[in-house]
Image (cartoon, rainbow, N blue to C red):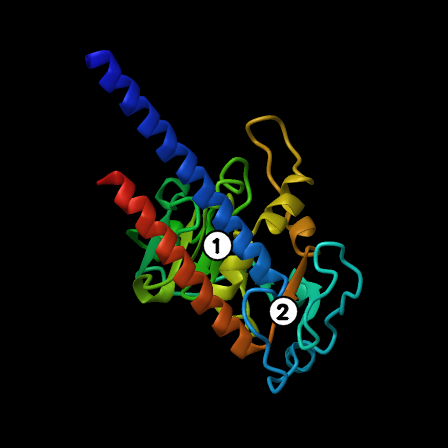
Amino acid sequence: MIESLMSIICEIRESKQQLSQSIALTKSKILDLAMQGKLVPQDPADEPATEMLRRVNPKAKIITDNPHYPQLPDNWVLTRIKDVFEINPKNKASDNIQAGFVPMASIHDGYSNKFRYDVKQWGEIKSGFTHFADGDIAVAKISPCLENRKSMILRDLPNGIGAGTTELLIFRSTILIPEFSLLFFKSDNFIKCCTGTFNGVVGQQRVGKSIVEDIHIPIPPLNTQRAIIERVQGWFNCLDNIIVSLLK
């Protein structure tokens, strides 16, 4: 009887693992649909993203040929990351104010947006570390942290600033809502574009800033960005609740 019960327990454990894997694949597919403009209805009355982009960056390059985004909605635009983000901006602050310090171990992986910080004096961490501020997006550039989706929106930092591991790329935008940006950086297509260009020895492989800044990113109108964020969060919350129920 004990052996029979143990067999049942093993089957349950295996089924839970398979379900967890299926949920991760489902989240990946949801993001892929979102970035292709297939997750929410489009409103033709919205200001086209092309006009929004031209207003913020008149020199932005409009991409018309990308096999992963072949049929974006008419009011979307495809451009390069460097045309919509300031990458690795620097902070200017007094040495004696408090700031947040974020090592890689304090960043959650997966599809969450969670991290922890230690409070330190800005003068202690302003040199030799990566700068960031509230509202910035942080993305791991080293393997396997990048593939494991160690990325987040920096929020509620002491005095709105911080620094952290040098293995982060920081993105700051005036055209993209941070939550939408984070969905893009957690998408399979972005991660595949990075991992396909890794350099360095095994165990220390990372993607370079010069590679990332030329990766193509789809830009929807602002209202569509908000709709995508709401829809994705709704689906992710539902899937997360299933995971929680498995742990009970």
229 in relation to 57, above or below: above
Residue matched to label 1 = 138
On the question of residue 132 being in view, the answer is yes
Indicate the secondary structure of the residue bearing disc 1. Answer: strand
Q: Gap between marks 2 and 1, in whole Å?
A: 19 Å
* Residue type marked 1: Ala
Q: Position of residue 117 (x, y in %)?
A: 31, 51
Q: Amino acid at mark 2?
A: Ile
Residue furthest to the bottom: 45
The answer to whether one can see residue 166 in this image is no
- Location of residue 165 by image quarter: top left
Question: In the image shown, does 118 or 154 lie closer to the viewer?
Answer: 154
Q: Nearer the viewer, mark 2 or mark 1?
A: 2
Location of the N terminus by quadrant is top left
Q: Nearer the viewer, residue 215 or 111?
A: 111
Q: 7 or 136: which is nearer to us?
A: 7
Label 2, residues with CA under 10 Å away: few <14, some 14-19, many ≥20: many
Q: Residue at x 35, y 60 (%)?
A: 95
Badge 1: residue crowd in 10 Å (few <14, some 14–19, many ≥20): many
Determine whether 149 is above or below 225 in the image.
above
Q: Earlier in the sequence, mark 2 or mark 1?
A: 1
Residue at mark 2: 219
The residue positioned 63% from the left and 69% from the top of the image is: 219
Q: Quadrant of the C terminus?
A: top left
